[in-house]
Amino acid sequence: MDVLAPIDQYLHRWLIAPVSDQFLGLFDLNGRLCVAFLFTSYAVAYGLFRWRRSRGLTDAPTFWQFIGGNRVHFHPSALLDYRYYFVRAILKVLLVVPIIGLVDPYVLRSGDYMRFFTRLWGARVQVEEHLALSLLYGLGVFLLQDFIHYWAHRAYHSRYLWAFHKVHHSATVLVPVTASRVHFLEKVVERLIDLVFVSAFAGIFWYACGGEISRYTLFGVTYMVFILNALAANLRHSHVWLSFGPRVEHVLNSPAQHQIHHSDAPRHFNKNFGVNLSLWDWMFGTLYVTQAQPEPIRFGTGEADHGRYLSLYSLIVTPFVDTLGKIRLARRPLGVSAVAGASVPATARTAPRAIAPAAEPGAGRAN
């Protein structure tokens, strides 16, 4: 028994506990994939199904067919997403947390900023915490994170980072769990960016208020995140076309807008980088608004990648192989690179990417 004890501890730490926590995350309101948010999203989808069927705008005989049916939810791409959701938990423990731990000691925290400004300008009288201040602080954190995630998302579509972000776009059908089809290095960058910028914002805000201010929460979740996750956020990765209309979509990112972001059509390339808000897309020229009538869309990363992202191994390793190939190509003599690189696209997305259609007749058309 003593011989097996270390093995049992190892398995529990690196396999059983991460996978169990990931499963329990389906019941955690801090995550978009919480069953409560899945329920609200599909409740909205069901309402759209009833509305469109009553007007003869869909030929889907059942709600299951309306949201994609077996062809979507049991597609090999979707089945891979389900598996990867749990593998990501293991990668988090093995790689993401240790990498962040190496960098963490060198990142300034909110307390560091408060001490710096206190030495620079002196201490401030602490403002009494009240609801409006908590709401303002929570809104500020939300806007900051959404803004930096917009620019990070644009960076992921650049030449060298695209290989890692392509893991997400390689899904040939969209299901809510596709949101978790993200390479672990992308999660490392995302968490470090959040740590740096949110710490700076919190430190400055708290210094201005003379002390720490808490964020207003709903059921333990930051209120803005809770509200937006409850508003059908899980339909972004689905085959249900839900447009908010051109006016609203200048501010809020609709499910249809994110489906456009996954589109293979050249007119859709490099559009709708916003996570929750499309305001940044509007401000910086990457906005694409949708209409009530669904557009024909296909998902994927193009015929050149057909068969390259069909396994857990390929989702994790292929980005490194592709990036190494680009680096080697860039180091070649100019004449050799010009010939060898003739088939390499100058930008991240220049060729059609698609295999599966976004919506067949009646499969999720909505206002």
Image (tube, helix red, strand yellow):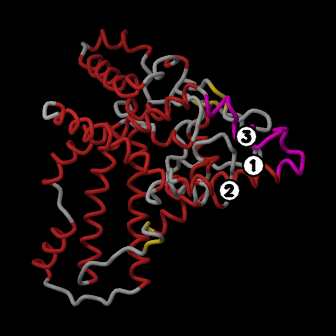
- Residue corresponding to mark 3: 64
Find the magenta span and give its range.
52-74
Three-letter amino acid code at the position of disc 1: Ala
Determine the CA span between mark 3 and mark 1.
15 Å
Q: Amino acid at mark 3?
A: Trp
Q: Earlier in the sequence, mark 3 or mark 1?
A: 3
Q: Is residue 36 above or below residue 137?
A: above
Residue ID for mark 2: 244
Q: Say few, some or many: other residues with alpha carbon within 10 Å of mark 3 (under 14 / 14 to 19 / 20 or more).
A: some
| 3 vs 1, front mark | 3
N-terminal of the pair, mark 2 or mark 1, is 2
Q: CA distance from mark 2 to mark 3?
A: 23 Å
Q: Is residue 15 in view?
A: yes
**Which residue is at a point 31% across and 37% down the rendered structure image?**
15
Q: Are marks 2 and 1 in contact (CB under 8 Å)?
A: no
**Amino acid type of disc 2?**
Phe
Image vertical order of residue 138 relative to residue 127, above or below: above
Front: mark 2 or 1: 1
Considering the numbered disc 1 on the image, is that residue within a helix, a strand or a loop? Answer: loop
Picture coordinates of residue 252, whole percent (x, y)? 58, 59
Inspect this view and state whether residue 185 appears: no
Asked if residue 71 lies in the magenta stretch, the reply is yes
Q: Nearer the viewer, residue 196 or 223?
A: 223
Q: Is residue 341 left or right of residue 236?
A: left
Asked whether, in this view, residue 265 is left or right of residue 182, the answer is right
Image quarter hosting the N terminus? top left
In this rendered view, identify the residue nearer to me: 171 or 50. 50
Q: Quadrant of residue 165?
A: top left
Few, some or many residues within 10 Å of mark 1 (<14, 14–19, 20+): many
